């Protein structure tokens, strides 16, 4: 059976963040993921998860100054100490909240450094993160992002991610495969998920072109969900989409897959 996790950084945004947990549970979700937990006390998050019988499935490493447009710092030379502090914070939250996967947004490619400097910095930072996470039996995820939504993002495709994982050389690094981002960048969704199954650690969904809920765009989710259900993937499917209306008004798509 498919297990859907509500990304409450993007769903139920008409409510205050801490109120979104109850809304997700009321809509049938049993898991929640969110981008950044760091503005909230761990005990508060533990309490709201427990109150709503929800499993926390995923959060991101700190990603720099989000309001200023930063989308990660792993590939930026000179920010290594900040990155490593963020790794320790992410692990602290993961251990307390019970999730086993932490995603890294690697950031936009800095233009003031050579490609070699950027790559060396990225590999060194991610190897550090992977080794820290391995000690806690945690999985490090790397997410390729489309360059239409985030121009200049450094990690943009499956093959690039696979090459990066090989360079890192750690057993606990996999791809966070976002179907929406990869439809925009490369297509070949089914064959990629089947061919690279052992390297995919988490799935996320949204339709294309407007990043709405499944059924609002061009992606054949009936087909893809059947592919996922028949595969060996047993993880959560993160619902990281922008509802066309309200989340609750558009949640009907999910019911048929939970029967």
Image (cartoon, helix red, strand yellow):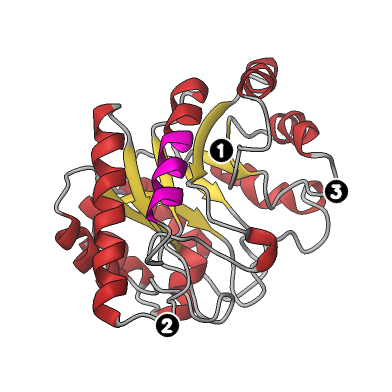
Which quadrant does the N terminus fall into? Answer: top left
Q: CA distance from mark 3 to mark 2?
A: 39 Å
Element under disc 3 = loop
Name the residue carrying label 3.
Answer: 14
254 up-or-down from 71: above or below:
above
**Chief secondary structure of the magenta span?**
helix
Q: CA distance from mark 3 to mark 1?
A: 25 Å
Residue at (17% x, 44% y) in the render: 171
Mark 2 packing: few (<14 Cα in 10 Å), some, or many (20+)?
few
Mark 1 packing: few (<14 Cα in 10 Å), some, or many (20+)?
few
Q: Earlier in the sequence, mark 3 or mark 2?
A: 3
Name the residue carrying label 1.
Answer: 258
Q: Position of residue 159 (x, y in %)?
A: 25, 72
On whether residue 171 falls in the magenta region, the answer is: no
Look at the image and give the residue range highlighted in magenta: 80-90
Element under disc 2 = loop
Q: Earlier in the sequence, mark 3 or mark 1?
A: 3
| Residue 202 vs residue 104, the one in the foreground | 104
Which quadrant does the C terminus fall into? Answer: top right
Tally of numbered tags: 3
Residue at (56% x, 38% y) in the render: 258
Q: Earlier in the sequence, mark 1 or mark 2?
A: 2
Residue 213 visible at all = no
Q: Position of residue 190 (x, y in %)?
A: 34, 67
The quarter of the displayed image where residue 214 is located: bottom right
| Residue 220 vs residue 23, the one in the foreground | 23
Q: Are marks 3 and 1 in contact (CB under 8 Å)?
A: no
Q: Position of residue 124 (x, y in %)?
A: 25, 56
């Amino acid at each position: 059976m498919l297990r859907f996790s509500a990304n409450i950084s993007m769903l139920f945004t008409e409510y205050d963040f801490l109120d979104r947990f109850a809304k997700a549970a009321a809509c049938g979700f049993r898991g929640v993921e969110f981008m950044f937990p760091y503005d909230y006390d761990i005990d508060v998050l533990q309490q709201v998860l427990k109150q709503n019988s929800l499993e926390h499935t995923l959060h991101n490493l700190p990603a720099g100054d989000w309001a200023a447009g930063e989308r990660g710092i792993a590939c930026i030379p000179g920010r290594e100490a900040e990155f490593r502090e963020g790794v320790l914070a992410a692990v602290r939250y993961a251990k307390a909240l019970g999730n086993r996967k932490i995603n890294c947004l690697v950031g936009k490619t800095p233009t003031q450094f050579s490609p070699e400097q950027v790559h060396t910095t990225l590999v060194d930072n991610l190897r550090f993160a992977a080794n820290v996470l391995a000690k806690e039996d945690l999985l490090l995820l790397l997410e390729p992002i489309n360059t239409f939504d985030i121009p200049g993002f450094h990690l943009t495709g499956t093959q690039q991610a696979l090459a990066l994982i090989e360079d890192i050389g750690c057993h606990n690094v996999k791809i966070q495969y976002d179907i929406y981002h990869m439809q925009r960048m490369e297509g070949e969704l089914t064959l990629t998920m089947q061919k690279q199954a052992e390297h995919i650690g988490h799935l996320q969904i949204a339709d294309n072109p407007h990043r709405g809920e499944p059924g609002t765009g061009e992606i054949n989710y009936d087909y893809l969900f059947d592919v996922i259900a028949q595969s060996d993937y047993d993880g959560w499917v993160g619902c990281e989409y922008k509802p066309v209306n309200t989340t609750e008004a558009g949640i009907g798509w999910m019911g048929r897959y939970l029967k």
